[in-house]
Image: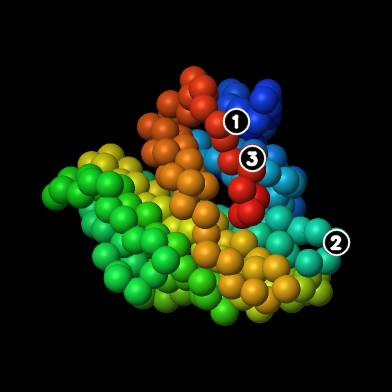
Amino acid sequence: MTVRRHTILLAVALLAISAPLLAATEGEVIRNGIEVDGKLVPLPDGEWKLVSQTVSRSGALNSLTMFRLSGDAVTAAALVQTAGAGSSTAWGKAPACERSDLPLARVRYASDHDGSCAWTALVNRVTPKPASTADSTLDPSWLAALATAENNRWRMPPSWSVVGLRVSDPRDAVQIRYAFANKDNLAQPPDQAWVDVAWERVELGFRRRIDGLNRSGFVGGHLV
């Protein structure tokens, strides 16, 4: 799995990811965006620490987990999952994208060879399952990140607002979950406008077209 950090130029709250500068390593602080296996993944405002990156035992799933910290408190998390080299990219729609009991669940397009969907959820804790049906266990990167948090005595929030996005085509597939700590343990439904911007940027990053995007970025909204 290839992971690269990007230097970002922000002007008038615009998000633009530059050419990769150096390989990111575990423990490194990342701002605004990261390259994962050739895809550009946008990150909300703040400093993100790359906590773990793993390859599933079957080789079908690459994943990495990042935390945003304030002191010893984890205020946000991001789990990025991509299809392993030579593995199937026919992930289909995420089951959550078709649920009717979530604050938001939408399918932008879906066919037998590509798809794009998004969902939001309010959860007590984040225990994500692998994006690919090739694996049946919890995501190894997330489990490793939880162990790292425990070893460092980082405080995990008791509840989260989660935004999930999945994009796939015949050549590749990516699923990203952004999880934000709910303030004062109060459930905060994810902002739909924020989700729409995130969704657009993930799709553009999936196709490496995020550099020229001239629209408002992640900055702003209660989820950043």
Q: Which residue is mark 3?
A: 219
Asked whether the residues under the numbered discs 1 and 2 touch, taking CB atoms below 8 Å apart as contact, a structural biologist would say: no
User: Measuring 58% from the left and 66% from the top, which residue is drawn there?
Assistant: 188
**Disc 2 element:** loop
Mark 1: amino acid = Leu
In the structure shown, which secondary structural element does the residue marked by tag 1 occupy?
loop
Q: Within 10 angstroms of label 3, few (less than 14), some, or many (20 or more) residues?
A: some
Q: Position of residue 40 (x, y in %)?
A: 50, 36
Q: Which residue is mark 2?
A: 71
Is 103 drawn above or below residue 47 in the view shown?
below
Q: Are marks 3 and 1 in contact (CB under 8 Å)?
A: yes
Q: Label for residue 169?
A: none
Task: Please name which of the two marks, 1 or 2, marks the residue nearer to the observer.
Answer: 1
Percent across and percent down for residue 177 are 49, 58
Q: Which mark is residue 15?
A: 1
Disc 2 marks which amino acid? Gly
Please state which of the two labelled residues, at mark 3 or mark 1, is closer to the viewer.
Answer: 3
Q: From what the image shows, is residue 85 above or below residue 103?
A: above
Q: Earlier in the sequence, mark 1 or mark 2?
A: 1
For residue 97, which quarter of the picture?
A: bottom left
Mark 1 is surrounded, within 10 Å at the Cα level, by few (under 14), some (14 to 19) or many (20 or more) other residues, namely many
Q: Nearer the viewer, residue 21 or 66?
A: 66
Q: CA distance from mark 3 to mark 2?
A: 21 Å
Name the residue located 24 percent from the left edge and 57 percent from the top edge. 92
Q: What amino acid is at disc 3?
A: Val
Whichever of callouts 3 and 1 sits on the residue coming sooner in the sequence is: 1
Left or right? Give the position of 90 relative to 27. Answer: left
Residue name at image x 37 percent, y 55 percent: 118
Residue nearer the viewer, 190 or 80: 190
